[in-house]
Image (cartoon, rainbow, N blue to C red):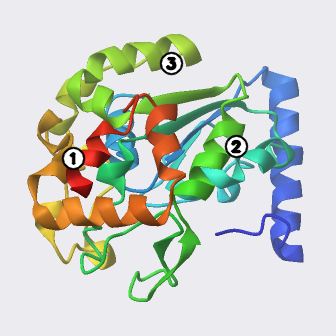
């Protein structure tokens, strides 16, 4: 997590210089700039969406792997960043948007039962996120992790606040993998973006994928890497397919009654009948 007010004097000077240069460019050349932010629940398809966009949207600079928008929002030009927990920083984005860029904030959600029963390719030994906390790397090499980042409930609350903004678009993982081109059209229309390829064919241009599990980010469990593969609905409701994952869901919902509200808020359930089935 970030403390957006904890920048060093050198960082603040760097930001101010970039702001002055950007202001001059805008004044002289009427240069409009924008920043695209991909965030949402961890394990909800943010990486998949980011790769779809990076392979289909020209004119933007895409940061590889995870990058918080705070480190790029002040820079000249059109940028795109992806970090799930950036959804917790949306409340500060206007303060940080010193260049008055147009913002396109895409928030990914997914059936919480799939989210809480998901594992990360780099840290596959634990379920990645629970109702209370989530695992998060403590260094840039992704070799040290702690279960101290916000969990489902805190992220859900941040999403509800972010949805009050007109420059935010909520996307469901299930809709993205079932009909990627329809989602692409909706994004293009809302934010006036000119894509030059189709989301459904993003996997055919791996050289354009911004998010890659390679180098120091090499996965420990490659079977969990889906970000560069053709979109498929096979992972929808996968929590039902193993007794271990069903037990994980049952335990989490028994510990936190608020999880039921997230299912209803995003349209995944209208009652608790499903829970009665697994509880018995």
Residue 26 lies, in percent from the top left, at 82, 28
Residue 72 lies, in percent from the top left, at 65, 53
The answer to which of marks 3 and 2 sits earlier in the sequence is 2
Label 3 Cα neighbours within 10 Å, binned few <14 / some 14-19 / many ≥20: some
- Locate the N terminus and report the quarter of the image it occupies: bottom right
Label 1 Cα neighbours within 10 Å, binned few <14 / some 14-19 / many ≥20: few
Circles 3 and 2 in contact, beta carbons < 8 Å? no
Report whether 99 appears left or right of 60.
Answer: right
Mark 3 lies on residue: 193
Identify the element where label 3 is drawn.
Answer: loop
Residue positioned 37% across, 20% down in the render: 184
Identify the element where label 2 is drawn.
Answer: loop
Which mark, by number, is residue 277?
1
Compare residues 23 and 191 and report the one nearer the observer.
191
Q: Quadrant of residue 211?
A: bottom left
Q: CA distance from mark 1 to mark 3?
A: 44 Å
The residue sitting at the bottom extreme is 144
Q: Quadrant of residue 122?
A: bottom left
Identify the element where label 1 is drawn.
Answer: helix
Compare residues 151 and 15 and report the one nearer the observer.
151
- Locate the C terminus and report the quarter of the image it occupies: bottom left
Mark 2 lies on residue: 76
Residue 259 lies, in percent from the top left, at 48, 51
Circles 2 and 1 in contact, beta carbons < 8 Å? no
Q: CA distance from mark 3 to mark 2?
A: 18 Å
Residue positioned 52% across, 38% down in the render: 107
């Amino acid at each position: 997590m970030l403390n957006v007010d904890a920048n060093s004097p050198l960082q603040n000077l760097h930001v101010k210089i970039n702001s002055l240069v950007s202001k001059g460019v805008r004044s002289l050349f009427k240069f409009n700039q924008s920043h695209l932010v991909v965030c949402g629940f961890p394990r909800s398809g943010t990486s998949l969406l980011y790769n779809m966009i990076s392979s289909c949207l020209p004119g933007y600079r895409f940061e590889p792997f995870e990058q918080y928008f705070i480190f790029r929002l002040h820079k000249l030009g059109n940028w795109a960043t992806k970090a799930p927990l950036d959804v917790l920083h949306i409340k500060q984005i206007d303060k940080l948007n010193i260049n008055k860029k147009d913002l396109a904030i895409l928030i990914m959600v997914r059936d919480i039962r799939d989210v809480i029963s998901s594992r990360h390719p780099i840290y596959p030994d634990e379920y990645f996120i629970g109702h209370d906390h989530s695992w998060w790397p403590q260094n840039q090499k992704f070799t040290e992790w702690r279960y101290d980042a916000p969990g489902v409930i805190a992220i859900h609350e941040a999403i509800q606040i972010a949805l009050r903004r007109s420059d935010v678009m909520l996307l469901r993982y299930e809709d993205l993998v079932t009909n990627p081109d329809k989602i692409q059209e909706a994004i293009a229309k809302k934010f006036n973006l000119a894509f030059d390829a189709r989301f459904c064919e993003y996997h055919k241009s791996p050289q354009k994928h911004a998010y890659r599990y390679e180098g120091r980010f090499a996965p420990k469990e490659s079977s969990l890497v889906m970000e560069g593969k053709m979109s498929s609905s096979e992972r929808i409701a996968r929590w039902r397919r193993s007794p271990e994952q069903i037990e994980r869901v049952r335990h989490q919902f028994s510990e936190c009654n608020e999880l039921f509200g997230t299912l209803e808020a995003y349209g995944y359930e209208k009652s608790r009948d499903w829970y009665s089935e697994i509880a018995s």
